[in-house]
């Protein structure tokens, strides 16, 4: 299904996300015919640009990031417009009214409007109120939807306040909270793998699964985002949102049908079942780390404290590892080991399901553990590891693997990227892959004790850039005789 006719209003149009992700995603959707000719994009920011200069900027970004050229590029750019607005001044939003009326008329978009907040989070509460001051939130003529980028709040309290503020002007069905991990094809595939195979689902519980490992590793550092990252850390940047969403996909119950309500009911339910962390749990089950300088492949790599925008005494974590549990019938007592970090040896996101060993050893030597490795990125795919007989005399077992690569599927090359998929869904009114308020709230509630611990300058261990985090993270998992996988 294609997008409905609509006007997309991007707040923060002169920012990085707009030219690196949003405009390229819209351009690609246009190129493959998923947007009709009846769409327009109105960039909004404080910067003093006009339609022409905004088009030029976006055209250059598309040439740079998407190698765009030719007639399609020209036609796409002709759908772009710009309006400069002082986004903290409610009165100034009045300028949007005639602009939008004009664009709706010109493109016959029946008043359908998608607002994308690609601004600093401090404006998330302000923009809905200012739009409402001019009636730009009402659905009298066409739908009005608002996409909010993470972070949805800074902690439990601010998330709650933001919610109240947004809900004063937009109803929940109009709010699309974007978590780009949910737009990844392989994250969605977790559901298909689990719920369309008689093979896996019967084993997917505490009776057969020993533990689950979730890794979101990045080899890059904080790059130019030191200022933002220092107020965030791995906990707010990756764990509270992306990794908990992945965990929910691994652990949720099957929805009766796939639609926004039933899917998101199950996601919220499982997140509500995360075992609350006491102070003692945090002491025993959490490891925070910060990278130090190193030579990697002959190149000098700065420490976190040397990064631009990072205070020299910062205690912010660039790595975290946590052992957590889910209090429900399916998962009682099954540990979930989750880790994420910057400046680790590889960029890899994966889920590993470790199955229990056989109840009684028949052969002299232990058979290899059975595991299912679900690779979310890169080299998307699934690998099943199990034991088979080593050829030759005796009954020695060795680990073998059955591998599937996503790229082998026909059609894999034309997959939509996360932003393409999510933008298209928002334009179609499908909120299935967007975070609902109760799920976001459950994530913050779970994470809040860790934020309190950080606030009180909880212990952050050093690790050398290019390694798998502090050795304390290895000790954490070793307490139960296990080891982290070292993916490459
Ligand atoms: C973003 C974080 O949300 O996700 C970044 O702010 C992180 O710090 C990025 O690098 C990771 O996304 P991906 O899709 O590259 O795994």
Image (spheres, helix red, strand yellow):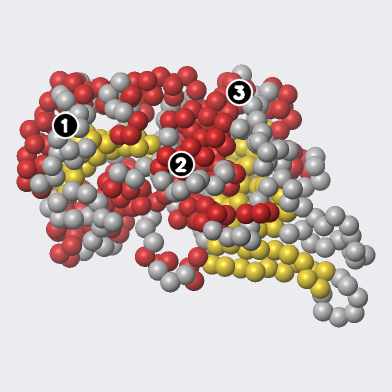
Q: Earlier in the sequence, mark 1 or mark 2?
A: 1
Q: Nearer the viewer, mark 3 or mark 2?
A: 2
| Mark 3 Cα shell of 10 Å, populated few (<14), some (14-19), many (≥20) | some
Cα separation between marks 1 and 2: 28 Å
Gap between marks 3 and 1 measured at Cα: 43 Å
Residue 35 in the figure: left or right of residue 216: left
Q: Which residue is mark 2?
A: 262
- Give neighbour class at mark 2: few <14, some 14-19, many 20+ (Cα, 10 Å): some
Question: Badge 3 is on which residue?
Answer: 449
Distance from the alpha carbon under mark 3 to that under mark 2 = 29 Å
Query: Is 284 displayed left or right of 57 in the figure?
Result: right
Please name which of the two marks, 3 or 1, marks the residue nearer to the observer: 1
Residue in the picture at 33% in, 25% down? 166
Q: Is residue 104 above or below residue 486?
A: above
Q: Are marks 1 and 2 in contact (CB under 8 Å)?
A: no
Residue closer to the observer: 468 or 112: 112
Q: Secondary structure at mark 1?
A: loop
In-image side of 122 versus 359 (left or right) = left
Q: Residue at x 53, y 31 (%)?
A: 443
- Can residue 9 be seen by looking at this rendering? no
Secondary structure of the residue carrying tag 2 is: helix
Q: Nearer the viewer, residue 451 or 102?
A: 102
Q: Which residue is mark 1?
A: 140
Going from N to C along the chain, the mark reached first, 3 or 1, is 1
Could you tell me if the residues under marks 3 and 1 are in contact, i.e. CB atoms within 8 Å?
Answer: no
Could you say where residue 335 lies in the image, as x and y percent from the top left?
A: 71, 41
Ligand 1 has an atom within 8 Å of the beta carbon of the residue at disc 2? no
Pick the quarter of the image with the C terminus: bottom right
């Amino acid at each position: 299904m294609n997008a409905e006719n609509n006007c997309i209003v991007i707040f923060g149009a002169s920012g990085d996300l707009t030219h690196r992700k949003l405009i390229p995603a819209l351009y690609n959707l246009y190129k493959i015919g998923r947007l009709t000719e009846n769409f327009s994009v109105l960039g909004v920011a404080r910067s003093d640009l006009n339609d022409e200069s905004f088009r030029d900027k976006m055209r250059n970004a598309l040439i740079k990031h998407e190698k765009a050229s030719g007639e399609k590029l020209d036609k796409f750019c002709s759908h772009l417009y710009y309006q400069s607005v002082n986004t903290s001044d409610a009165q100034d939003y009045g300028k949007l009214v005639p602009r939008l009326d004009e664009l709706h008329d010109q493109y016959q978009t029946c008043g359908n409007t998608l607002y994308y907040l690609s601004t600093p989070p401090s404006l998330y509460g302000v923009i809905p109120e200012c739009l409402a001051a001019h009636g730009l939130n009402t659905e009298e003529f066409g739908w009005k939807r608002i996409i909010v980028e993470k972070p949805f709040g800074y902690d439990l309290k601010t998330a709650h306040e933001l919610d109240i503020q947004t809900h004063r002007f937009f109803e929940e069905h109009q709010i699309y909270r974007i978590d780009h991990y949910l737009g990844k094809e392989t994250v969605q595939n977790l559901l298909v793998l689990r719920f369309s195979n008689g093979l896996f689902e019967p084993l997917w519980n505490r009776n057969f699964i020993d533990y689950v490992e979730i890794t979101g590793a990045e080899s890059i550092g904080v790059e130019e985002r030191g200022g933002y990252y220092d107020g965030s850390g791995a906990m707010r940047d990756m764990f509270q949102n992306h990794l908990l969403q992945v965990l929910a996909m691994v652990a949720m119950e099957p929805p009766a049908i796939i639609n926004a309500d039933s899917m998101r009911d199950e996601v919220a339910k499982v997140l509500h079942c995360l075992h609350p962390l006491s102070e003692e749990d945090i002491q025993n089950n959490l490891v925070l780390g910060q990278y130090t300088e190193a030579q990697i492949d002959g190149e000098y790599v700065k420490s976190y404290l040397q990064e631009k925008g990072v205070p020299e005494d910062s205690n912010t974590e660039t790595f975290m590892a946590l052992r957590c549990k889910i209090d429900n019938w399916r998962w009682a007592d099954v540990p979930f080991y989750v880790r994420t970090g910057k400046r680790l040896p590889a960029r890899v996101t994966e889920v590993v399901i470790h199955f229990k060993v056989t109840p009684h050893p028949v052969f002299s030597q232990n058979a290899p553990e059975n595991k299912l490795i679900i690779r979310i990125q890169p080299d998307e795919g699934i690998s099943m590891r199990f034991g088979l007989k080593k050829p030759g005399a005796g009954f020695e077992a060795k680990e073998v693997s059955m591998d599937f690569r996503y790229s082998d599927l026909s059609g894999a090359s034309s997959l939509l990227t996360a932003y393409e998929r999510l933008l298209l869904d928002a334009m179609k009114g499908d909120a299935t892959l967007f975070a609902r308020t109760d799920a976001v709230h459950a994530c913050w509630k779970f994470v809040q004790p860790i934020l309190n611990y950080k606030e009180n300058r909880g212990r952050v261990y050093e690790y050398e850039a290019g390694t798998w985090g502090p050795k304390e993270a290895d000790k954490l998992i070793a307490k139960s005789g296990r080891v982290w996988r070292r993916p490459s």
